[in-house]
Image: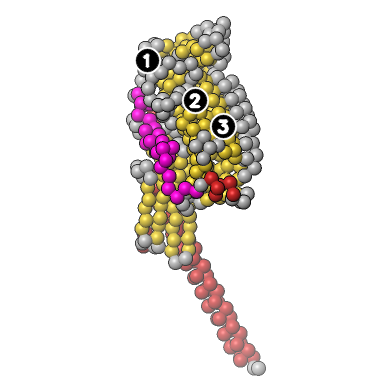
Amino acid sequence: MTYAVFLLFLSTVLSFLLFSLYQNFDQSYARLETSTKLLDNCHSGIALGVSALNTEFQYQENNFEGMGSLRVKSRPWGCFKSVSSQAEHQGDNIIKAAIVATENEQLEGLAIWLAPEKNFLKVAGNTTIQGDLKLPSGGIKSENIGGQDFTGEKLYEGSIRDNPNFILGLTTNIDNYWNAYLNGRSQNALDSNTFFTANLDLIDQSFHDITLLYEIKGSVRLNERSFRGNVIIRATDTIVIGKEAEIDHLVLVAPVIIMEADASIRANLVAQTKVDIHNSAKLKFPSSILLLSNRSNKGQIQIDSNAVVEGLIIAKGVEEIYNKIDPLVQIKSGARINGTIICFDDLDLRGSLSGHLLSRRLVYKNPDALYRDVLFNASVSTDSNRANLGYPKYSVASAGKRKEEIVRWLN
């Protein structure tokens, strides 16, 4: 082979290699461009679901932004909302899902909101309040409760506000939605046999797939099994959560829900009669507790010492006035709440709350008496750094400027 022939051969090979590299680069760039566009479309779908005002929202377009299909789903998920989006083009597929909460501007800096009744808020013991207050018409004063005076230097650190009575319009849609489930509204439900005979160590359901709804007659104890994602477990009696249970983002629906001591899960508890969070149990962010309104009994949420709840607590209680002894929500000494409490009746708070407290009335109950309009040995603060921890200003208020906010991406 002459030198000229060799150079020609070498030039041909190099040209072929360069052409192949160009083709591969061009195809890779095209794939990258498609993937980027699909991701943008997917995020656009999430934005559609976040802003949707309907209780349940579904959207589908086969030629979204000129590239493939887009499918969006959103629905109530405990006291939050789940949103999922799927963008697809020529076999490429991207799915995103998120949990969404509602933010209300009026909660900015607000520690305590109480119904505008003609009385005082009385503080006693080592109570501390940091943040603004919306108080009964009488204002705030110190008091001796059970032989204990107020021991602090200041009754509160913040200012007194004159806010609208927005608690009166709260949670109607959420309450009606989950009451419908308790009253038998269920589609594509799986029965008890399916739940108890499943030999799966892990049940993991995407939020873009159909919701797995397990209907259980009677009571069930969840322990030593793992459940994750788009799953609702509904029992007709009691759900008990053991400390070995691994539960992430589920909705649990039952008249009575009990978290045993040291259990640690991320879930949304929807109950009609009672929720018990036992000693040192933890509901991780973003979790919620919803006690539905009902006419048959008083109902109660009880959170024991050293328990932690990160998220939102809404207690609707009964729909008519009754003579009661026990508060609707009782949070014992040493318990910690990071988020917001919305209580439509009596709330007995002895632990600490970092976030916002909205209640019709505060009470303190000991074995001998029930003291009304009292905050005793409690700590309430609206932490300015909470946003950095992922706890938004939760509310589902009917008044005030509000917006939906993604509080956790699920993938």
Which segment did they paint magenta?
165-190
Of marks 3 and 2, which one's residue comes earlier in the chain?
3
The answer to if 308 sits in the magenta stretch is no
**Image location (x, y in percent) of residue 159:** 43, 19
Q: CA distance from mark 1 to mark 3?
A: 34 Å
Q: Earlier in the sequence, mark 1 or mark 3?
A: 1
Reply above or below: 393 against 123: below
**In this view of the protein, which residue sits in the foreground, 392 or 230?**
230
- Secondary structure, mark 2, is strand
Is residue 176 found inside the magenta-colored segment of the image?
A: yes
Mark 1 belongs to which amino acid?
Glu
The residue shown at (44%, 33%) is: 394
Q: Position of residue 208 (x, y in %)?
A: 46, 52
The quarter of the picture where residue 298 lies is top left
| Residue sitting at x 59%, y 49% | 197
Give the residue at mark 1.
Answer: 117
Q: Which residue position is annotated with label 2?
A: 300
The quarter of the rendered structure image containing the N terminus is bottom right
Query: Mark 1 vs mark 2: which is more N-terminal?
Result: 1
